[in-house]
């Protein structure tokens, strides 16, 4: 059986990449922990797939791997949702910035205009 | 028109009071027209000239246009520096954001009343003074311009009816024309409106805010000038679906 080793290798690469990203300061400690746990779970599940049946039976799903797949799918949907809300927030932040810049620039322009008008009156 | 003291653009009334000193004293100084413009190089200059000729002060918001819109606006501003105020979004943000910027800018300049006006030449500037009458008589906080649906091409008419129905279903407010671009509001309501939508959904959102803040609303019939150009702009099916999606999300946000 070669498949557990492939999965294990991928998970190992995943862990190393996460640690590198953490060292470079591109991930928070929380995300580091989260991803390491996920990858370790992947290793465990690929080497001992039978054990997942225990959990599957608790929830009422027949086979262990089915249970894992369902969990994975739900996890993916959750991540997509997270990314969606994050993007919404980013977009509204950008909008706020753009609006603020526009309003500030307009204010400055009007002020310059007023100064020019008043100085030309003095002359 | 006998009611000269309630009509915007009547310079005599303002001058006789004579207490408002500043660059804009000779105009109908507290009424601002907010014109959001995105890639409207063909029409924006014409719209601005029409508004200026009638003595209004205009806030134009260039919403990150990629064509010559901004340079046309700047050129007009050089000719009438006291009547035009220009805000430029560096990145395109959508109608909602542009309206918000324009309204904030107008408030900064001491606006008492503001009118939102589309830059695609589909509105008649003559309608503005009719829109302002209920505001100045204190009969309304918000005035919505209602287009005549009889003169509307069928596909536009159906789209608008659907949007009205959706607005009613989601926000429980019956209006004759929820997507009209011509609206007038007083300072109080401009300060109260909390607009989050950045795109075309803002039209329905304004209705929601009117309802939430229990503002007085009056509908005034307006003329609409349909050209091939103005027909190609505005709400289409995909934008309609987007608005629907936002409305559904809005329901979830309330919980």
Image (cartoon, coloured by chain):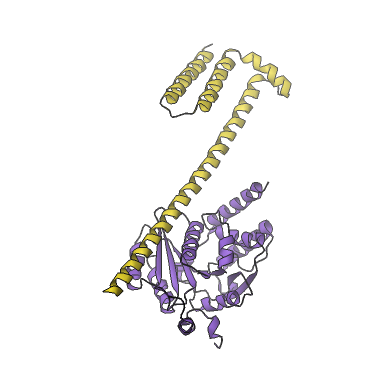
Chain colours: A yellow, B purple
Residue B86 position in % (x across, y down) = 40, 64
Determine the residue positioned at 52% across, 40% down. Answer: A86
Residue A121 appears in view: yes
Give B197 or B189, whichever is nearer the viewer. Answer: B189
Q: Quadrant of the N terminus of chain A?
A: top right
Image quarter for residue B120? bottom left
Residue, far bottom: B2
Residue B168 position in % (x across, y down) = 67, 61
Image quarter for residue B147? bottom right
Residue, far left: A123
Query: How many circles with numbers are drawn on the protein?
Result: 0
Residue B162 position in % (x across, y down) = 62, 61
Tell me if residue A54 comes above or below residue A93 in the rendering: above
Tell me if residue A80 comes above or below residue B25 in the rendering: above
Q: Quadrant of the C terminus of chain A?
A: bottom left
Give A117 or A49, whichever is nearer the viewer. Answer: A117
Q: Is residue B191 left or right of residue B175?
A: left
């Amino acid at each position: 059986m070669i498949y557990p080793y492939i999965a294990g290798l991928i998970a190992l690469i995943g862990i190393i990449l996460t640690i590198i990203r953490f060292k470079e300061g591109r991930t928070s400690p929380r995300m580091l922990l989260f991803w390491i746990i996920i990858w370790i779970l992947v290793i465990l599940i690929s080497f001992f797939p039978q054990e997942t049946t225990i959990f599957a039976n608790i929830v009422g799903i027949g086979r262990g791997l089915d249970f894992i797949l369902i969990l994975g799918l739900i996890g993916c949907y959750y991540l997509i949702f997270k990314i969606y809300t994050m993007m919404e927030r980013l977009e509204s932040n950008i909008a706020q910035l753009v609006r603020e810049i526009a309003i500030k620039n307009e204010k400055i322009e009007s002020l310059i205009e007023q100064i020019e008008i008043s100085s030309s009156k003095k002359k | 028109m006998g009611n000269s003291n309630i009509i915007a653009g009547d310079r005599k009334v303002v001058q006789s009071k004579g207490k408002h000193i500043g660059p804009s004293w000779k105009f109908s100084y507290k009424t601002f027209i907010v014109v959001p413009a995105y890639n409207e190089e063909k029409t924006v200059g014409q719209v601005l000239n029409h508004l200026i000729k009638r003595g209004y002060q205009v806030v134009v918001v260039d919403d990150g246009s990629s064509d010559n819109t901004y340079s046309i606006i700047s050129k007009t501003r050089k000719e009438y520096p006291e009547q035009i105020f220009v805000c430029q979004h560096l990145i395109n943000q959508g109608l909602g954001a542009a309206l918000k910027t324009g309204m904030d800018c107008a408030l900064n300049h001491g606006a008492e009343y503001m009118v939102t006006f589309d830059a695609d030449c589909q509105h008649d500037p003559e309608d503005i003074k009719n829109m302002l009458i209920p505001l100045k008589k204190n009969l309304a906080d918000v005035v919505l311009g209602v287009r005549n649906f009889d003169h509307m091409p069928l596909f536009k008419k159906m789209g608008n009816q659907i949007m009205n129905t959706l607005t009613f279903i989601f926000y429980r407010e019956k209006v004759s024309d929820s997507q009209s671009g011509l609206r007038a509001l007083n300072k109080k309501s401009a300060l109260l409106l909390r607009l989050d939508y950045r795109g075309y959904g803002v039209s329905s959102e304004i209705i929601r805010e009117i309802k939430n803040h229990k503002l007085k609303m009056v509908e005034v019939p307006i003329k609409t000038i349909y050209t091939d150009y103005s027909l190609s702009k505005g709400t289409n099916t995909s934008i309609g679906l987007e608005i629907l999606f936002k409305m559904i999300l809005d329901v979830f946000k309330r919980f």
